[in-house]
Image (cartoon, rainbow, N blue to C red):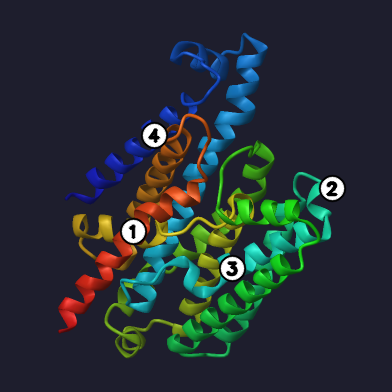
Amino acid sequence: MNRRLLIASLAIAALVLMLVSMLTGPAGLGPVQSIRALVAGGDEAAMLIMREIRLPRALLAALVGFSLGVSGAALQGFLRNPLAEPGIIGVSASAALGAVLMFYTGIAGASLLALPAGALAGAAVCVFALIAIASARASTITLILAGVALSSLAAALTSLVLNLSPNPFAAYEIIFWLLGSLKDRTMDHVWLALPLMALGWAALWSSCRALDALSLGEEGAAGLGVNLARARLFIIGGVALSVGAATAVTGAIGFIGLIVPHLIRPLTDRLPGNLLLPSGLGGAALLTAADIVARSAIVERELNVGVVTALIGAPFFLWLVVRSRREVF
């Protein structure tokens, strides 16, 4: 498919799904009333619902989905592994640990932004550790092992905090947050995450040429003049910033970064650099659609969007594993 047509189609799909998301909810607002309240004002209750509840939710779904999609495409190109996804470098688990510690210490209740701030602090620790390794001219396999180790350590510490939780209500809050959700988010969450996500996107975009060259292997990329140490630093740092900021405001949402590049890749020339923007737009569309399903699937109670993406992604991941095994043998 023509690249411009693909990007335009995905952008339109994401925008349409954002509009559907803003028109979806239990308040019983009609489409005309919803759009009027969002654009022109009018009824105060409708304005509050549209501008303070539905708009931030739709924006965060698109921004987080974009971050996960572009990060997944970048990591699959960087590691030359179709099963790679953003959680492999440990940032998601570290951000989750930071948020869990906010719950455990009671700081989360002190401010609306205390929870995402704690998650960002946890992600920052992981980022600094990975950047320190990347700047030491470590090999790609070393970075992967470091990410897996950090992820395992963060998961173990999260389990420890759950074991030591002072009461069942705190444990319930922790588990609920770990499932990933876009519920009750505000524009404060959007403004907190957006600058960090944008820095991550910029770092990944600056690495497009390096990603294309790395498809030939590290020796081939070096022969083409690519600075491998700089490329590792920008790719790992970009993914960490994007995914860390996303996890900080929504909790852990999996599989978007794994699924979307696989769905989009056959429609492109398969160069990793050219896959970034389409994967980001595809991620925005998919997560927004998943959030609509999370609100609509069960009338009595809203599902966590992380549960919906896992229900979609886990069978897809198994299919990828089976297909990869067939190709090997």
Mark 4 vs mark 1, CA separation in Å: 18 Å
Helix or strand or loop: what does disc 3 sit on? helix
Question: Mark 3 against mark 4, which lies toward the viewer?
Answer: 3
> Which mark sits nearer the N-terminus, 3 or 2?
3
> Which mark sits nearer the N-terminus, 3 or 4?
4
Mark 3 vs mark 1, CA separation in Å: 19 Å
Q: Is residue 15 left or right of residue 101?
A: left
| Coordinates of residue 86 in the picture (x, y in percent) | 47, 66
Helix or strand or loop: what does disc 2 sit on? loop
| Coordinates of residue 206 in the picture (x, y in percent) | 45, 65
Q: Is residue 283 visible?
A: yes
> Which mark sits nearer the N-terminus, 4 or 2?
4
Mark 4 highlights which residue?
A: 17
Mark 2 highlights which residue?
A: 110
Tell me, for residue 259, which label it has, or none.
1
Q: Residues within 10 Å of mark 1 (few under 14, many from 20)?
A: many
Question: Mark 4 against mark 2, which lies toward the viewer?
Answer: 2
Mark 3 highlights which residue?
A: 93
The residue depicted at 30 percent of the width and 85 percent of the height is 217
